[in-house]
Image (tube, rainbow, N blue to C red):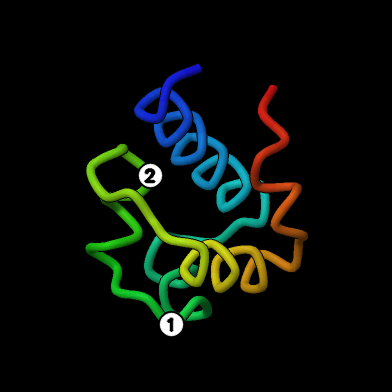
């Protein structure tokens, strides 16, 4: 898996986890302390989040960082 494929899968995974938690993009962005625009771009593989952002998202979803990378 190359870097672009990894970020694409990560974005899809975050979107799926967000939807499973019944959160809108706006609510997850708010809980994560990141902008709505940035979160949306992560989900569609435009932005490539760093570790600090991934920690914020995982914490907002109440999951481990490892769980973000548990691709189907």
- Say left or right for 9 vs 22: left
Q: Regarding mark 1 in the picture, which secondary structure is present there?
A: loop
Question: Residue 26 occupies which quadrant of the picture?
Answer: bottom left
What residue lies at 27% left-to-right and 50% top-to-bottom? 47
- Between 13 and 22, the one lying in front of the other is 13
Q: Residues within 10 Å of mark 2 (few under 14, many from 20)?
A: many
Q: Quadrant of the C terminus?
A: top right
User: Residue 33 got which mark?
Assistant: 1
The x and y percentages for residue 51 are: 51, 63
Q: Relative to 1, does residue 26 appear above or below in the rendering?
A: below
* Residue labelled with disc 2: 43
What residue lies at 55% left-to-right and 66% top-to-bottom? 57
- Between 45 and 15, the one lying in front of the other is 45
Q: Relative to 56, does residue 71 appear above or below in the rendering?
A: above
Q: Residue furthest top?
A: 1
What residue lies at 42% left-to-right and 71% top-to-bottom? 29
The x and y percentages for residue 32 are: 50, 76
Q: Residues within 10 Å of mark 1 (few under 14, many from 20)?
A: few
The x and y percentages for residue 27 are: 46, 72
- Say left or right for 6 vs 71: left
Question: Residue 60 occupies which quadrant of the picture?
Answer: bottom right
User: Residue 62 got which mark?
Assistant: none
- Between 9 and 21, the one lying in front of the other is 9
């Amino acid at each position: 898996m190359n870097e672009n494929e990894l970020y694409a899968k990560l974005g899809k995974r975050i979107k799926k986890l967000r939807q499973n938690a019944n959160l809108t993009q706006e609510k997850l962005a708010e809980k994560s302390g990141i902008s709505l625009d940035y979160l949306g771009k992560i989900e569609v593989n435009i932005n490539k989040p760093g570790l600090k952002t991934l920690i914020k998202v995982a914490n907002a979803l109440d999951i481990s960082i490892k769980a973000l990378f548990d691709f189907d």
